[in-house]
Amino acid sequence: MAPAVLHWLTDPWAEPLMRRAFLEIVLLGVAGGALGGWVLQYQLSYSAESLAHALLPGLVLSALTGIPLLVGGAAGLLVAAAAVALAGRAPEIGRDTGVAVVVTALLGLGVLLALSPDAPPRLNDLLFGDVLGVSDGDLLAAAALVLVLLAALVLLHSRLLAVGFDRLTAPALGVRPVVVDAALLVLLALVLLVAVQGLGNLLVVSVLIAPATAARALTRRMGTMLLISGATAVLGGAVGLYVSFHLDTAAGASIAATLVLLALAATAGERVARYRATGGGPRTAPR
């Protein structure tokens, strides 16, 4: 039995593409873990989802024209950010409605471009990712972007804490919330560019939100939450790769599903622990 288990554990890593995929997952886990906690703290989950979907036209255009994926994705993010900003300035339709219309329109435009007769094969990888197809160049680009992200987060840490936990008094500490919000959105766009190669346009947000949700169920200390979130993302990515290898399922979808299951398990465990700690529910005050 032991040799069979050993083969089950080691067989995936005999393939170079699996080793590259795992390195990509480690990079995504570090990036998502470092930023995901802040995304939840600043209530930017919807913004992350919106930006991820809205950059699809840029990704498709990069595939159609042969330009690097990162360049097309960056251009798509710039157009999406400008469109969302303009939509938010139209009070007659409301900010949320304007953002929803812009995101839906850009996602639809991306799908229409993907239906072009000139579209290359396997364009669906832009939607669901191809973590098994990352190259050494993709890994180097992702590593460089992650280093930039981590350096920026270290420099912004105290400002992020000040605004994230007490936005009203942050200006008294010399911190401008609007500047911090803008910087966080730029970093969010950077992580999306890193992750879209492996997880695709539709699954990319899972590496940001699911690990951070699991971490927040286990701790309320920001530093600890970021570490747990990163570790959860890497663990979920590795388990997802095992599932993909042994069950012959799509790697990106397997990773996303594993991360969501970990988040659900952590949330359920926290609620059970809280239920037991309160003796079966909230206590009623004596009359």
Image (cartoon, rainbow, N blue to C red):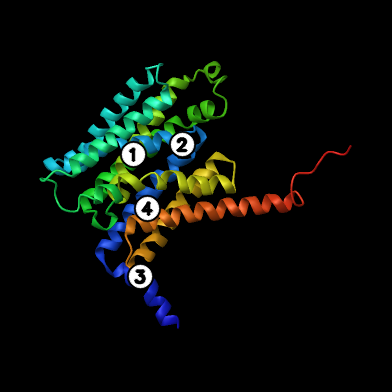
Q: Earlier in the sequence, mark 4 or mark 3?
A: 4
Residue at horizontal 52 percent and vertical 17 percent from the top: 171
* Camera-side residue of 174 and 244: 244
Residue at horizontal 35 percent and vertical 70 percent from the top: 246
Give the number of the disc on residue 26. 4
Mark 3: few, some, or many residues within 10 Å (few <14, many ≥20)? few
Q: Amino acid at mark 4?
A: Val
SS class, disc 4? helix
Q: Is residue 136 above or below residue 164?
A: below
Q: Is residue 126 above or below residue 22?
A: above
Q: Is residue 148 visible?
A: no
Task: Determine contact: label 1, label 3, CB under 8 Å.
Answer: no
Q: Is residue 129 above or below residue 192?
A: below
Q: Which residue is mark 3?
A: 246
Q: Which quadrant is the N terminus positioned in?
A: bottom left
Q: Which residue is mark 1?
A: 52
Q: Position of residue 173 (x, y in %)?
A: 54, 19
Q: Nearer the viewer, mark 4 or mark 3?
A: 3
SS class, disc 2? helix
Q: Position of residue 50 (x, y in %)?
A: 37, 35
* Marks 4/2: CA–CA distance: 19 Å
Q: Nearer the viewer, mark 4 or mark 2?
A: 2
Residue, far front: 92
Q: Amino acid at mark 1?
A: Ala
* Camera-side residue of 84 and 130: 84
Residue at horizontal 25 percent and vertical 51 percent from the top: 125
Q: Earlier in the sequence, mark 2 or mark 1?
A: 2
Give the number of the disc on residue 39. 2
* Marks 3/2: CA–CA distance: 33 Å
Mark 4: few, some, or many residues within 10 Å (few <14, many ≥20)? many
* Marks 1/4: CA–CA distance: 20 Å
